[in-house]
Image (spheres, rainbow, N blue to C red):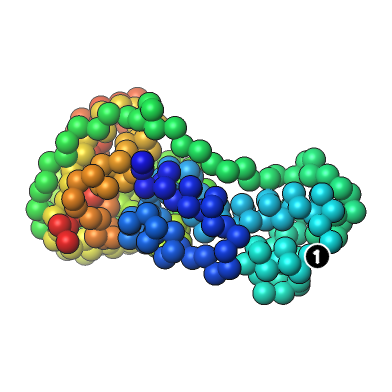
Amino acid sequence: MSIVAKALWYIENNYAKSGLSLDDVAAACGASRFHLTRAFGIATGRTLMRYLRARRMTQAALALAAGAPDILALAVDAGYGSHEAFTRAFREQFGLTPEALRARGHCEGLELVPALRLDHADGMPLAAPRLLERGAFTVAGLCARYTHETAAGIPAQWQRLAAYPSPPCRVGSDEYGVCIDADEGAFDYTCGIEVAGSVPPGLTRLDIPAQRYAVFFHAGHIAAIRMTWRAIFDRWLPQSGLHPTGGPEFERYDERFDVTTGQGGVEIWIPVSSS
């Protein structure tokens, strides 16, 4: 059973528990906060805690449509300490108050979040990675913050980078897409080039430390690269005996990649440790 499938099962069986946290779900899955957050976001396109809140709100909406009399009890079950806080969050998600939904008596037109199920029967085959040590290096590029829900904006970020002339301090011809994750699933993404010395005006400097990496090759079209990321975090890492360090991960676009067609393949570098 994959890490994400375990998390989904645990959430569905425990979302009504007061104080259920990311740490609780990670412990139940035998994963670190970072590993679970990364795997869940890649596999589902949303953050784990946002999914948990949405599932609780969905169950509350169904109960209210069925005429549940005690809104405060529903608020507590959904993880809110007051009627007011629950009402604000409920209106944010569904566009009406709990009282209005109960009076209406049905959930038609509401964006309910059903329980997710992952089918791994057709999981992407993943070739064994190379394990490499790489020294520290510096990337200069454009940085933006995303969640897994807003990551569709990354290609436009690469288009903006293309408008910058190649500086004399550039090292090699490779380009890098570097991801630095946060616990709740939001992450900083830098698209850029390796440089030596000062960073050109208008670009952000990102210093990447010396690390050990598992290096995978995504051979398909760039549009399908998320499937390879998912296979790495959801299937390969739990079975590998290695652990993601939480350091910068990156995609490396070398001379094999054709930016016009999206073909040619991309390397994915994941910093790992054995402890």
Q: Nearer the viewer, residue 263 or 39?
A: 39
Picture residue at 68% right of the left edge, 52% below the top = 59
Left/right placement of residue 221 relative to residue 266 reads right
Quadrant of the image containing the N terminus: top left
Q: Residue furthest right?
A: 103
The image shows residue 83 at horizontal and vertical percentages of: 76, 71
Picture residue at 90% right of the left edge, 54% below the top = 103
The image shows residue 60 at horizontal and vertical percentages of: 72, 55
Q: Quadrant of residue 188?
A: bottom left
The image shows residue 142 at horizontal and vertical percentages of: 37, 55
Quadrant of the image containing the C terminus: bottom left
Picture residue at 24% right of the left edge, 60% below the top = 245
Q: Which residue is mark 1?
A: 70
Picture residue at 12% right of the left edge, 41% below the top = 130
Q: Quadrant of residue 256?
A: top left
Q: Nearer the viewer, residue 27 or 183?
A: 27
Can you say whether 55 is above or below 208 in the image? Answer: above
Asked whether residue 160 is in view, the answer is: no
Left/right placement of residue 26 relative to residue 47 reads left
Left/right placement of residue 254 relative to residue 79 reads left
Q: At label 1, which amino acid type do we have?
A: Asp
Asked whether residue 59 is in view, the answer is: yes
The image shows residue 182 at horizontal and vertical percentages of: 40, 62
Left/right placement of residue 93 relative to residue 7 reads right
Dot 1: element? loop
